[in-house]
Amino acid sequence: MSNKKKLYIETLGCAMNTRDTEHIIAELSSKDSYELCNEAKIADLIMINTCSVREKPVNKLFSEIGVFNKLKKDGAKIGICGCTASHLGDEIFKRAPSVSFVLGARNVSKVVEAVNTDKFLSVDIDYDESTYAFGEFRNSMNKAYVNISIGCDKQCTYCIVPHTRGDEISIPPELIIKEAKKAALSGAKEIFLLGQNVNNYGKRFSSKRDEKIDFSDLLNLISQIEEVERIRFTSPHPLHMDDKFLETFAKNPKVCKSMHMPLQSGSTHILEQMKRGYTKEWFLNRAMKLRELVPNVSISTDIIVAFPGESEKDFEDSMDVIEKVRFEQIFAFKYSARPLTKAAEFTNQIDSETGSARLKKLQDRQNEILDEIASQKSGQVLDVYFEELRNNGLVAGRSDNNALVQVEGNEELLGKTLKVKITNPRRLALYGEIVQ
Ligand code: SAH
Ligand code: SF4
Ligand code: F3S
């Protein structure tokens, strides 16, 4: 049995948090003597990588700490990192005295020091060059997350992220290419680029650069890496979806044909209140242009219902956009007032029942749309890149345009791209058989 210390880490947030978790594991295994385990009760160190975007995951943090206090080994430490660590800081020690360190989303590079210092606290959001100089660890051999920027310069009035992750800074393209290449050479044929506003890439670097570069240029550069077969990214911002970006997306064969277009609201008035910087018409124009350029594109979105002041008519504007765009996937949320944000101060908050009713109406209609979309997929043949074994004898993968496809099979399919004929299309997954 190995005499290494055991690390258990739970990730509550978005893809960026997932990547931060990989960085933490890389640091603690290369610069200290930890190895990953998948049971909290045998761990010497339990970490929770938190999310602050809505109130629910923050409450979950404190209930999880309670659970871990009960089941942890004697002497095991609990450490909190990520976005809630950034915004609550030392309040976490006060509310949960068993916590031994608090490390903000932008301070992950200090994890070794944090683990070895009692009551260590580091939550500043200043620029930290080392945030992208980590060792190697990846959850998946087949898909590699690669950060292209950190932080966010937008000030959407409902959103806490700029307060937890700081200003937006692009990572130099040479470093991104180096990381993508390394991942691809070790078997990851799919590179997944991460940033809060990926298509705003190149506006600010930590030190001055002579050459200009934007996100379209970056996509083209990464696609020149021979071993990379597929490129995905999240999240682009609708405001920055100019023609050059849409055309690059359409033309570059390695760029997967699924686009996340976070709408947030279909009402131009609410979009103004949110400070999103675009109108309903601009969003519809971009979505239609995208469908025209890439007929098989799948478009996903995020929608917030019951933002302060959202009238029935504003909400119907969101319903109208889902009717017109027919999104292949919607992440819909009821507005949650967050500390440090402008919208939390607005006096026209919407009551929770109205929010729940609107959320249900939107989700019910979307489910009908998804059933209609799925029913048209029967008999289609898709190229599927297999990534994950499911425990019921199925293997799951994604089509180029991000549909979840499952077939019967075993681990031999992992990492391969194969043609699959869809025999049973369902709303959440397409079931099929390999035809080649
Ligand atoms: N940078 C990304 C979003 C990151 S946050 C973008 O601009 O699209 C992920 C999603 O959480 C957002 O798209 C939004 O829909 C949701 N969200 C953010 N703040 C929220 C809040 N206060 N209440 C409810 N949902 C929120
Ligand atoms: Fe939040 Fe807006 Fe930045 Fe997205 S763009 S992270 S919603 S402030
Ligand atoms: Fe991500 Fe949640 Fe932070 S969505 S950026 S982990 S607040």
Image (cartoon, helix red, strand yellow):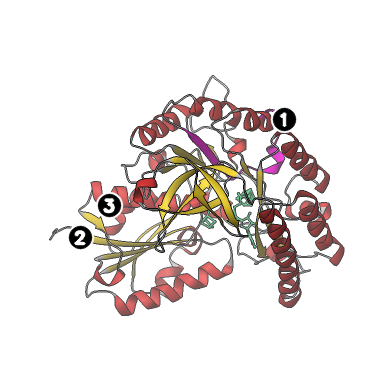
Q: Please report contact status of discs 1 and 2: CB closer than 8 Å, yes or no.
A: no
Disc 3: which residue? 28
Is 291 situated above or below 21? above
State the SS at label 1: helix
Tell me which residue sits at (58%, 69%) in the image.
55
Q: Nearer the viewer, residue 283 or 399?
A: 399
* Res. 243 mark: 1
Q: Is residue 291 left or right of residue 14?
A: right
* Res. 235 mark: none
**Badge 1 or badge 3: first in the primary sequence:** 3
Is 95 situated above or below 90? below
Q: Amino acid at mark 1?
A: Asp
Q: Which residues are magenta?
A: 229-244
| Alpha carbon distance from label 3 to label 2 | 10 Å
Q: Is residue 376 left or right of residue 195?
A: right
Q: Amino acid at mark 2?
A: Lys
Residue 301: x and y in percent read 66, 52
Membership of 234 in magenta stretch? yes
State the SS at label 2: strand
Disc 2: which residue? 5
